[in-house]
Image: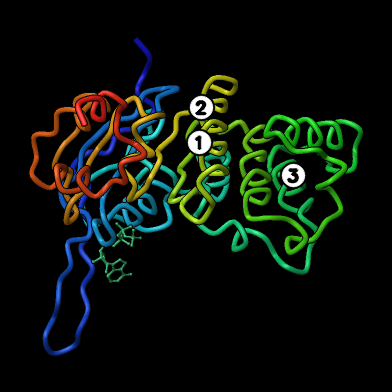
């Protein structure tokens, strides 16, 4: 049985706004779950359900109001203090966001994000090892280094840019990857290929992955377990078969009903 790499223990985040009349939003409300080594879990919910807030807390970008996040045995909000601790954390926990264009600086060649990954590992990007690693990582995600290196972001497609971001994982070899709506801006066929890359990453590097999405259909194919979030709480959890084929919660049923029929199993159509 593989070890737990991440434990979220009763995590809550309350945002307060307003001056005279204080308004409180419980963006994340008493959420507990674990992620095992090499496991892919999905956090699924509609807009505003608290997925991104939870992702930011795990990335150590936003402090929780209460609760603990334990990564590799360490409480990330109470035990990681020095710059070195944080650098080490972000070497191990990597994120990929929705808009690949936003992860690149338009004025720099795309090589820069790979060079930065190499520097995080203490490898000179211009050394023989650095150049070899860049090329290998691009090939791992199905890209031809000759067509990518030396280009500016606007010269590549959204799918290619997202692949470059994923190729960084072959350099950084993170223990945990948080993919927040990482495929939602891509067309359907590119989306499928990027999802396959997440599976490849888990198999080849052994990374655990938290796949955050509003699309329950996508999560069916790659997740070991699915967590459904609604108004900051986890309302249902289980394997894809348990959650999607036999949902118990009313909100999960609504999410499934809104999924295009493309995801439905062939058996559903046989009687039609
Ligand atoms: N910085 C903030 N200040 C106040 N409220 C916030 C802040 N960030 C998020 N919220 C609120 O917290 C709730 C959860 O937001 P969050 O972005 O985590 O949801 P989400 O499920 O990721 O949605 P989406 O899919 O649209 O990104 C929402 O009601 C949102 O308005």
Q: Nearer the viewer, residue 93 or 226?
A: 226
Relative side of 141 to 261, left or right: right
Residue depicted at 78% across the width and 60% down the height:
155
Image marks 1 and 3: residues in contact by CB distance under 8 Å: no
Q: Nearer the viewer, residue 13 or 114?
A: 114
Q: Mark 2 or mark 3, which has the lower sequence index?
A: 3
| Label 3 CB sits under 8 Å from any ligand 1 atom | no
Q: Secondary structure at mark 1?
A: helix
Q: Where, by quadrant of the figure, is residue 240 drawn? A: top left
Reading the image, the residue beneath label 1 is 195
The spot of residue 23 in percent (x, y) is 14, 77
Residue depicted at 24% across the width and 50% down the height:
258
> How packed is label 3: few (under 14 Cα within 10 Å), some, or many (20 or more)?
some
Relative side of 49 to 73, left or right: left
Q: Which mark is residue 199?
A: 2
Q: Nearer the viewer, residue 146 or 15?
A: 146
Q: Mark 1 or mark 3, which has the lower sequence index?
A: 3
Q: How many marks?
A: 3
Q: Secondary structure at mark 3?
A: helix
Reading the image, the residue beneath label 3 is 119
Q: Where, by quadrant of the figure, is residue 105 drawn? A: bottom right
Mark nearer the viewer, 2 or 3: 2
């Amino acid at each position: 049985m593989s070890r737990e790499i991440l434990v979220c223990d009763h995590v809550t985040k309350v945002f307060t706004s307003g001056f005279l009349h204080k308004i409180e939003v419980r963006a994340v409300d008493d959420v507990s779950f674990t992620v095992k080594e090499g496991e892919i879990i999905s956090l699924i919910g509609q807009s505003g359900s608290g997925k991104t807030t939870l992702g930011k807390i795990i990335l150590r970008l936003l402090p929780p109001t209460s609760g603990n996040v334990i990564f590799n045995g360490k409480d990330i909000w109470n035990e990681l203090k020095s710059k070195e601790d944080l650098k080490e954390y972000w070497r191990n926990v990597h994120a990929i966001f929705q808009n690949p264009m936003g992860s690149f600086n338009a004025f720099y060649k795309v090589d820069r994000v790979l060079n930065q990954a190499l520097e995080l590992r203490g490898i000179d990007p211009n050394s023989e090892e650095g150049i070899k690693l860049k090329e290998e990582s691009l090939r791992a995600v199905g890209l031809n280094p000759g067509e990518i290196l030396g280009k500016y972001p606007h010269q590549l497609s959204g799918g290619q840019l997202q692949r470059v971001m994923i190729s960084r994982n072959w350099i950084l070899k993170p223990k945990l990857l948080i993919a927040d709506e990482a495929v939602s801006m891509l067309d359907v066929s590119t989306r499928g290929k990027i999802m396959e890359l997440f599976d490849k990453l888990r198999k080849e590097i052994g990374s655990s992955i938290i796949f955050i999405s509003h699309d329950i259909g996508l999560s069916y194919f790659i997740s070991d377990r699915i967590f459904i979030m609604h108004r900051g709480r986890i309302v249902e959890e289980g394997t894809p078969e348990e959650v999607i084929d036999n949902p118990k919660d009313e909100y999960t049923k609504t999410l499934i009903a809104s999924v295009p029929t493309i995801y439905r199993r062939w058996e559903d159509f046989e009687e039609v």
